[in-house]
Amino acid sequence: MTRAPEPADPAAAEEPARQRHVCPVWIGYLLLSPLRRLAESPERILAPLVSPGTTVVDLGAAMGYFSLPLARMVGDGGRVVCVDLQEKMLAVLRRRAARRGLAGRIETRLATQEEPGLTDLEGQAALVLAAHVVHEASRPQRFLAACRDALRPGGRLLILEPMGHVSLAEFERTRGLVAATGLVERPAPALRRSHALLAEKVAG
Ligand SMILES: C[S@@+](CC[C@H](N)C(=O)[O-])C[C@H]1O[C@@H](n2cnc3c(N)ncnc32)[C@H](O)[C@@H]1O
């Protein structure tokens, strides 16, 4: 059996696993609702954070509500690495991308709760998006350390969490875990229904 690589931080390496509820596939379809765009427009949230030609990661991508707009934003020279625990989510994402002529910019990867599988991207990603997924991670410290490691200097991590589902207190705990990774918090987009946190990997 292949062992998951240990994160550099001892705290993340020793973090005990917690039982977490993972979003079922049928909810993956609901997350694609056009109505969602009223409160959470991918273009409005992501356009200021994405440049053409860059590598971005959509961690917990599900069926690609954010991944396809990201693929349009990075353009032909960029790529979107879409990671999820569930192959069924990724299969729908691939079909949706192919129908829209975006398959060439999208790569899908199956993660485990132990390891998001980003080690080969170390220092490369301009943006890691973790939308509505941190509360599902059974090892959030590990998860956030992997996000940090994938970022290039100046790269940013954007975390969104649903307000109805994740309390402010839980979100503040996530904020503390992000600070512990060494990422530096920056002003985040203001959203009506989601908590948002933006953090940068400062060079040097
Ligand atoms: C609530 S859905 C959000 C999907 C998408 N980001 C969006 O906003 O529409 C959460 C997704 O994250 C995936 N997920 C949960 N824990 C994960 C982990 N540790 N690594 C990768 N994906 C994970 C689930 O399988 C599910 O598809």
Image: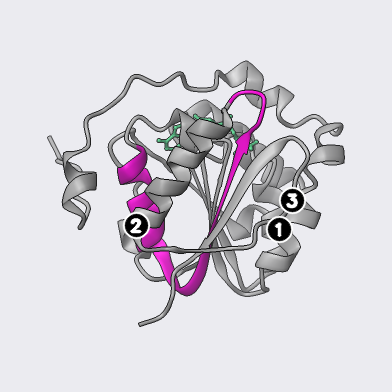
**Mark 2: amino acid:** Thr
Disc number placed over residue 192 in the picture, else none: none
Return the disc, 1 or 3, that comes first in the chain's sequence: 1
Quickly name the residue at label 3. 190
**Circle 3 — which element?**
loop
Residue 200 vs 132, above or below: the answer is below
Is 55 left or right of 49, judged from the image as shown?
left
Asked if the residue at tag 1 contacts the one at tag 2, i.e. Cβ–Cβ closer than 8 Å, the answer is no
* For discs 1 and 3, the disc positioned in front in the rendered view: 3
Q: Secondary structure at mark 2?
A: helix
Q: CA distance from mark 1 to mark 3?
A: 12 Å
Q: Which badge, 2 or 1, comes first in the chain's sequence?
A: 1
Residue occupying the point 64% across, 52% down: 103
* Residue 179 visible to an observer of this rendering: yes
Residue 40 is one of the magenta-drawn residues: no
Image coordinates for residue 16, horizontal then vertical, percent: 22, 30
Using the rendered view, name the quadrant where residue 72 is placed. bottom right
Amino acid identity at mark 1: Leu
Q: Considering depth in this image, is 198 or 142 the residue closer to the camera?
A: 198
Under circle 1, the secondary element is helix
Q: Name which residue lies at 75% across and 50% down.
A: 42
Q: Is residue 184 left or right of residue 32?
A: left
Q: Which residue is mark 2?
A: 181
Question: Residue at coordinates 28% horizontally, 36% vertically from top-left?
Answer: 114
Q: Which is nearer the eye, 57 or 148?
A: 148
* Residue 20: percent from left, percent from top: 40, 21
What mark, if any, has residue 46 been given in the picture? 1
